[in-house]
Image: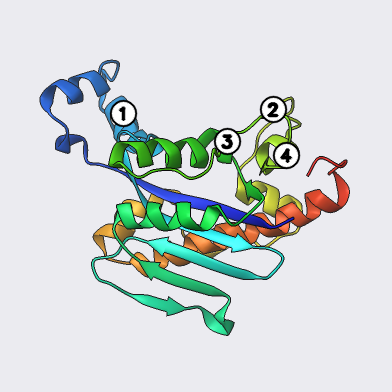
């Protein structure tokens, strides 16, 4: 079985970029400054109010990865030891390249991908007119096609959910957050034109997810994927 791990990074559009009617709708229940700031922060979470900055993919069997990321210039480079190939492009190009690659694999592995990455990729593609090539949301209770580790590690949300960082620390895996970057830093990184930092941070997430998948697959996978 060929398999790939993927992860995305997103960034909400500025609230002011929406027309006044839309702003009013988004702020409908935000009656304090704190709630307004929460609305602005949470724009990152929805494909109708945010863009995809980066998609990282990693094959845990071949130890090879690809990262497609937005940048203000065309660039292409390899990581140390040629483990990952980084390619910049527009959001449309990022999505097109993702859909081209994902068709080559039987199974895809994510962390919280059913609740976030997969619907985001599919809906964002629809908004931009990019044709998806796979259904990233197959039958939930069979991990043979889509193994969402957050669902597996919570036994389909019957136990408490934790962050990827928390699971990594609990299982003795190096966390991608150890380098001092989190998803909350995307606006600062874009404003500073640190596009490579975004791409490399996203790749760190799939490497950590791969290590977590290995632990789950060795001890908790009872023949389901």
Residue 34 circle label: 1
Number of marks in the rendered image = 4
Give me the residue at 76% from left, 31% from top: 155
Q: Is residue 127 visible?
A: yes
Q: Which of the two marks, 2 or 3, is nearer to us in this view?
A: 3
Which residue position holds label 3? Answer: 114
Which residue position holds label 4? Answer: 143
Sequence-wise first label, 4 or 1 = 1
Q: CA distance from mark 2 to mark 3?
A: 12 Å
Q: Position of residue 76 (x, y in %)?
A: 38, 76
- The answer to whether marks 4 and 2 mark residues whose Cβ atoms lie closer than 8 Å is no
Report crowding for label 4: few under 14, some 14 to 19, many 20 or more residues within 10 A (C-alpha).
many
Q: CA distance from mark 4 to mark 1?
A: 40 Å
Q: Position of residue 2 (x, y in %)?
A: 69, 57
Q: Is residue 15 toward the left or the right of residue 86 in the image?
A: left
Q: Which of the two marks, 4 or 3, is nearer to us in this view?
A: 4
User: Which residue occupies the foreground of this view, 99 or 185?
Assistant: 99
Give me the residue at 72% from left, 39% from top: 143
Q: Secondary structure at mark 1?
A: helix
Residue at the limit of the structure toward the bottom, as seen here:
81
Q: Is residue 216 toward the left or the right of residue 188 in the image?
A: right
Q: Secondary structure at mark 2?
A: loop
Which residue position holds label 2? Answer: 157
- The answer to whether marks 4 and 1 mark residues whose Cβ atoms lie closer than 8 Å is no
Q: Position of residue 106 (x, y in %)?
A: 67, 50
- Quadrant showing the N terminus: bottom right
């Amino acid at each position: 079985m060929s398999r790939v791990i993927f992860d995305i990074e997103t960034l909400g559009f500025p609230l002011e970029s929406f027309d006044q009617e839309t702003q009013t709708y988004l702020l409908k229940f935000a009656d304090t400054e704190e709630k307004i700031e929460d609305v602005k922060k949470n724009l990152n979470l929805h494909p109708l109010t945010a863009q995809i900055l980066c998609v990282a993919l990693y094959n845990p069997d071949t130890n090879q990865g690809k990262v497609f990321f937005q940048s203000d210039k065309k660039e292409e480079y390899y990581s140390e030891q040629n483990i990952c190939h980084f390619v910049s492009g527009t959001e449309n190009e990022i999505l097109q390249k993702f859909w081209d690659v994902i068709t080559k694999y039987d199974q895809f592995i994510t962390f919280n991908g059913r609740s976030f990455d997969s619907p985001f990729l599919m809906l964002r593609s629809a908004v931009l007119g990019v044709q998806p090539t796979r259904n990233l949301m197959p039958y939930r209770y069979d991990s043979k096609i889509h193994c969402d580790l957050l669902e597996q590690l919570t036994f389909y949300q019957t136990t408490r959910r934790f962050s990827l960082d928390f699971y990594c620390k609990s299982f003795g895996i190096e966390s991608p957050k150890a380098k001092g970057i989190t998803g909350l830093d995307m606006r600062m990184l874009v404003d500073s034109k640190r596009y490579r930092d975004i791409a490399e941070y996203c790749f760190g997430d799939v490497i950590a997810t791969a290590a977590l998948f290995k632990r789950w697959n060795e001890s908790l996978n009872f023949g389901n994927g």
